[in-house]
Amino acid sequence: MDRSASASIPSSTAGAPLYSFPIPSFSLQGKNLSSLFTALVIIVSLLVLEQAVYRYKKKHLPGAKWTIPLIGKFADSMSPSLEGYIKQWNSGDLSAVSVFNIFIVMASSNEYARKILNSPTYAEPCLVHSMKQILRADNWVFLAGKAHVDYRRGLNALFTRKALGIYIDIQESICRKHLSRWLATTEKTPAPIPIMMIARHLNMETSLGVFCGPYIPEEAANEINTKYWDITLSLELVNFPLALPGTKVYKAIQARKVAMYWLEQAAHKSKIAMAEGGEPACMLDEWVTTLKDPNYKGRREFSDLEMAMVIFSFLFASQDAMSSGLIYGFQHLADHPEVYSKVKEEQDRVRQGNFSKPLTLEMLDQMTYLQAAVKESMRVMPPVLMVPYKATRAFPITDNYNVPAGSMIIPSFYNSLHDPEVYPDPKSFLPERWLDPEGSANANPKNYLVFGAGPHRCIGLEYAQTNICLVLATAIAMMDWEHDVTPKSKLVEIIATVFPKDGCRLFLKRRAD
Ligand code: HEM
């Protein structure tokens, strides 16, 4: 038995000298020395190999010459900043970083961003690393090639003009309900309110209302809304690799389970309601009805689980991006009184002074200035800054650079949307640039990457634009707002998408007329 002090005295013994902790003793002789030496050689070799592989993959691309061992730029990816990204994008049309030994190529120019989005043979969306765990690996969004094209074709029926016409009443009534609550809050305490979280709630209830209609009770919508924040928080470029209890990904998976429970129930109820001859009143109903149409060509049977996964993918794609678009819509209008008053004049004209008349798609079509303002708001501050793709094979992106197979390759949209050749004075919020059909903004639609491009281009883009216009039009019908500008208003918080750092604080006042 070892009688040495270090082996026998527990470390918690009061008064025990520091040296008496049970530190494993290495006798620096013979076999132990050679094991230690071997271990050191292996570690150093692995570290050298790591650097060599990074340098080999990076070649001449701009980026750090060396990568921080094991973690790379993990710390930066934990607290991303728009300024940091802009610096990276401006360092070259293509640039390299490594995080947790995932080699990442950032593409900032319009040419390369579009090339990635339009090259399904070489690259496919990988969203962020954790997404397969959160969305489930069998979610349709992870399909590739023909399987993806066919599946998506069936879903297009949910975003036709006819379908959008069904959704509009739901959108408007939920919007009016929420805006009335916002006003009631400020009437109690006339302080400015940060709209970030309440706009997210409005958006969540609208999405669930549009997607699932009466089949999701309000308590469920509230529960999903609260839990969903865990999903948003988990959307980091690179997460801790294991979904252990307590990690962000683990919490996000629990939140998905709650949402999926309600969505599956909703799919089931919609099928029953439509089988009983009900009229379509939401997206699920529209889908179930389309599948029964004798002229419909495509797969006809979808289980409740499959339908729930599709609806969850829509929720996932829309909750953060749409909330960001909405919040900056409010902020940009408040910060530009000349634009705000033109939007108000247009509302008066289109609604002919009747602000309680229900909105229709035709009325929204006539709000061309508001549409331009919404388009411009998302150009200045694109909700989605970039979309991570993965190189499925060596991708010859330029004549002298192949993105190595297995790398992350991230097209970013910011530089395309701030190209001074296409959008003169790119940082300024100028809706007028969209009013001239011959102007450079309209002449270069390839630069407007707010909704991506290629086979994975946002399927919900018309619905999204309509909804942001509808919320702002309804808000103008019900209230006036002013921005409580703080030192953080112009700073950008990146939590999956972009938000003003102070949560966009607004003074709200019920419209007098
Ligand atoms: C302002 C709001 C929105 C923005 C800025 C936005 C932006 C985007 C972007 C950038 C992509 C990736 C495109 C690509 O890889 O090329 C995308 C994909 C997608 N979006 Fe949206 N989106 C918004 C709202 C919505 C809504 C409301 C829905 C559904 C109702 C939706 C559903 C989807 C889906 C399903 C995809 C993946 C499509 C596929 O892989 O085929 N999005 N969106």
Image (cartoon, helix red, strand yellow):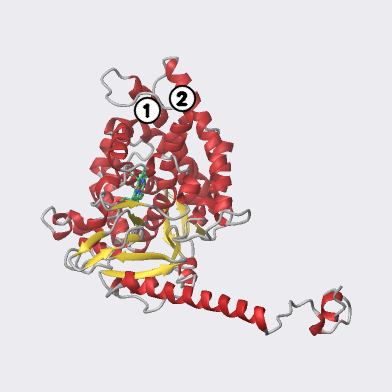
In terms of secondary structure, where does tag 2 sit?
A: helix
The residue wearing badge 2 is 270
Residue 238 lies left or right of residue 227; in this view the side is left
Is 130 drawn above or below residue 20 in the view shown? above
The N terminus: image quadrant = bottom right
Give the residue type that dot 2 points to. Answer: Ser
The residue wearing badge 1 is 287
Residue 246 lies left or right of residue 109; in this view the side is right
**In the image, what residue occupies the spot 44% across and 43% down?**
315
Q: CA distance from mark 1 to mark 2?
A: 9 Å
Are discs 1 and 2 less than 8 Å apart at CB? yes
Residue 6 at least partly seen = yes
Observer-nearest residue: 192 or 397? Answer: 397
Residue 54 lies left or right of residue 249; in this view the side is left
**In the image, what residue occupies the spot 44% across and 57% down?**
496
**In the image, what residue occupies the spot 46% across and 50% down?**
131
Choose top left, top right, bottom left or bottom right for residue 170. top left
Give the residue type that dot 1 points to. Answer: Trp
Callout 1: CB less than 8 Å from ligand 1:
no
Residue 104, image x and y in percent?
A: 36, 65
Choose top left, top right, bottom left or bottom right for residue 294. top left
Observer-nearest residue: 15 or 83? Answer: 15
Choose top left, top right, bottom left or bottom right for residue 293. top left
Is 76 drawn above or below residue 163 in the view shown? below
Residue 187 at least partly seen = no
Residue 318, image x and y in percent?
A: 40, 46
